[in-house]
Amino acid sequence: MPDTIKILLAEDEPSLALIVKESLETRDFEVIVCADGEEVLQKYNEEKPELLVLDVMMPKTDGFAVAEQVRKTDKRTPIIFLTAKSQTKDVVEGFQHGGNDYLKKPFSMEELIVRIHALLNRVVGGSEEIKKDDDIAIGSYVFNPTKQTLTYKDESEVLTHRETEVLKHLYQNKNEMVTRSFILNDIWGNDDFFSGRSLDVFISKLRKKLSADPAVQIINSRGFGYKLIC
């Protein structure tokens, strides 16, 4: 990963594009702004950015179509959608078209920056691969996703499927923030209120199950996501 991260920003509203560009540049990102989908594809091929921030509703070619084109040859570069659409089906459609995350307008710059860093950290570090039947050390615990077990010393307990999937996502990105929207859409298939409350319950259960080792913590950034410290 280069010292200066190059971000391709697709936003056809000039005032918003300028605000986002200037805010990201104060964090030492290099930002390339495009006003329509065709320009995005051209600049993407020329500049090879490390991350794309795509407005869904763009002239000529919309953000979903742009993401589909990018994903034909590039499965790795993170894509964040910006959208005024708030229906669950619209959000799910974004993930189906190759997006990694999304932000509903209006959004705060701090939230966008947190999500950018979370996605870039996954690319830089790479999600830790979990092989079948692996016993994984999480502090003093042993986690086996295949058997859905969590063992502390000689005591083992069986996790539910959802507990296993949430802990697996956190472990694969340990010591890095994982956004709520990524976990919810990947496991639940949506990020509506009820799914979000369900995730909060599973996080609380996992915290209790991991509480015997003070070196292991699940911390949260309110409204953004969770981080497994181990």
Image (cartoon, grey):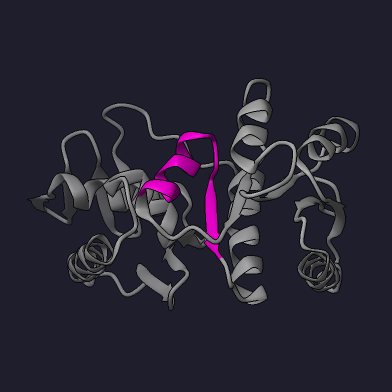
- In this rendering, the answer to whether 20 lies above or below 12 is below
Instruction: Assign the C terminus to one quadrant of the image.
Output: bottom left
Image-quadrant location for residue 135: top left
Rendered residue at 63%/21% (across/down)? 72
Q: Nearer the viewer, residue 103 or 4?
A: 103
* Residue most extreme to the top: 72
- Whether residue 96 appears in magenta in the rendering, the answer is yes
Q: Nearer the viewer, residue 220 or 98?
A: 98
Q: How many marks?
A: 0
Q: Nearer the viewer, residue 123 or 154?
A: 123
Query: Where does the magenta region start and end?
Result: 89-104
* Residue most extreme to the right: 46
* Residue most extreme to the front: 59
Find residue 85 and report its horizontal and vertical position in percent.
49, 57
Q: In this rendering, would 158 be left or right of 204?
A: left
Rendered residue at 85%/47% (across/down)? 2
Q: Nearer the viewer, residue 171 or 136?
A: 171
Whether residue 230 is visible here, answered yes or no, is no
- In this rendering, the answer to whether 21 lies above or below 56 is below
Image-quadrant location for residue 16: bottom right
Find residue 94 and report its horizontal and vertical position in percent.
50, 43
Q: In this rendering, would 5 be left or right of 200?
A: right
Q: In this rendering, would 87 be left or right of 210?
A: right
Instruction: Assign the N terminus to one quadrant of the image.
Output: top right
Find residue 15 and report its horizontal and vertical position in percent.
81, 71
- Whether residue 115 appears in magenta in the rendering, the answer is no
Rendered residue at 80%/40% (across/down)? 40
Image-quadrant location for residue 83: bottom right
Find residue 65 and report its horizontal and vertical position in percent.
62, 33
